[in-house]
Image (cartoon, rainbow, N blue to C red):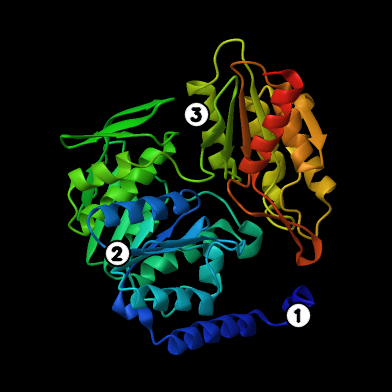
Amino acid sequence: MKNIIKKFTPSFLISWYHLSLAFLGAVFYRFSSNKIKIIGVTGTNGKSTVVELTRAILEEAGFKVASLSSIRFKIGDKEWPNLLKMTMPGRFQIQKFLKQAVNSSCQYAVLEVTSEGIKQHRHRFINFETAVFTNLTPEHIESHGSFENYRRAKGRLFQAAKGIHIINLDDENSNYFLQFTAKKKIGFTIIKRNKEGISVIEAVNTEVSPAGLKFSINDTEFNLRLLNEFNIYNALAVICVGISQGINLEHCKSALEKIKGIPGRMEQVISRPFRVFVDYAFTPTALEKVYKNLAENYKQANTKLICVLGAAGGGRDKWKRPILGEIAGEYCDEIIVTNEDPYDENPMGIIDEVSKGAGDKTRKILDRREAIKESLKLSQAGDVVIITGKGCEPWICIERDKKIPWDDRKIVKEEFAELRIEKNI
């Protein structure tokens, strides 16, 4: 019924509907964002990680912080999982969250801001002080109509935030985000870049290893337990936030070096006799970075990289399905394509589209648990298994708005325990 209404309702009326809800939410909760410093994080990949790390740095500096991401909600010491299957909640929910943060005497709120949320005016009537741009690659193209519209949606956060803009200078879209007016602009890079009129934070001597990441800023060396090179960029974004708020590099270093990992983001679930990782990656760029990191830093000679993947959300971004398969075919020795979040679409149809790009190494297994089980059975000592697409998401979304409780990490542990008994590992 909802889809039928959307189909026959003029787009301007839908837009006004969402804008009206945003205004009413702000009024009902008395424009709470005016009483707290709001940091918004946007981009294609890395948003949740940047939100989580930003909160850690601010807390290390002694501030009371609220944060909202696809992983969890947190207000001071109280936290609860994000079970909404929605990164950026609806207007009343997000305004209620900000009101609760103010009532709890939080000084900062760090919010993950999505293009879909912006399209539905969920960012409106929120007084953003700081906007952070992580990176941009094609995503939600069918929803927005074009990559330019998708980028334009992200840009609206920077139009709204007049205080501080923090921008990844190594992203090819950085100049677009640099054009917006702000009191202060800070760029970050690992490729020496100078931009006129902005402060630049550069990481040098970068190293990536199975133990984590190493880099230096000025004379301060950071040794992080986070995995994958792209987390250097996420850490740099967060360090820029810290610097913008008067937090020194030593505080940033102390906070970041305490973090063992981010739930569902390159999370190692099994360490021996083979390694099993779970990651949220569902865009071509993110998937390739994950596979490349594992191939270069974990896969040894005469061992295999085994991947389990699907395709993000039925009914959306169909263009990328064979591309995801092609990327898996390039890096992985064994490929299992399985169900992810089909919604109202035929899940086997999605699996077939992904498999077209993956070639002869592909196995199609509809049941995601069976797919994970098969990946473990295929593994020998020293192999690496990577399960992508869901991370720590708590549901598989199927037809008629139904949800199946899920957690890739839990399923891996359960199936590995069975395998240990069966094979006496």
Label 2 crowd (10 A; few <14 / some 14-19 / many >=20): some
Q: Examine the rendered structure and indicate whether residue 175 appears above or below residue 164.
A: above
User: Which label lies toward us, 3 or 2?
Assistant: 2
Of pointers 3 and 2, the one earlier in the residue sequence: 2
Can residue 186 be seen from the camera position used here? no
**Mark 1 surroundings within 10 Å by alpha-carbon count, few (fewer than 14), some (14 through 19), many (20 or more):** few
Asked whether residue 407 is in view, the answer is yes
Mark 3 sits on what residue?
293
Q: Earlier in the sequence, mark 1 or mark 2?
A: 1
Looking at the figure, which quarter contains the N terminus? bottom right
Are circles 1 and 2 on residues that touch, CB within 8 Å?
Answer: no
Q: Which residue is mark 1?
A: 5
Q: Residue at x 48, y 51 (%)?
A: 136
Image position, residue 372 (x, y; %): 72, 35
| Numbered badge on residue 64 | 2
Q: CA distance from mark 3 to mark 2?
A: 35 Å
Q: Say if mark 3 contacts mark 1, CB within 8 Å.
A: no
| Element under disc 1 | helix
373 vs 301, nearest the viewer: 373
Q: Residue at x 54, y 44 (%)?
A: 264
Residue type, mark 3 in image: Asn
Left or right of 305, for residue 375? right
Q: Position of residue 412 (x, y in %)?
A: 66, 36
- Which mark is first along the chain, 1 or 3? 1
Q: Residue at x 17, y 49 (%)?
A: 248
| Amino acid under disc 2 | Lys
Label 3 with label 2: CB-CB less than 8 Å:
no
Residue 97 is drawn in which quadrant? bottom left
- Quarter holding the C terminus? top right
Q: Quadrant of residue 241?
A: bottom left
Question: Disc count in the image?
Answer: 3
Q: Amino acid at mark 1?
A: Ile
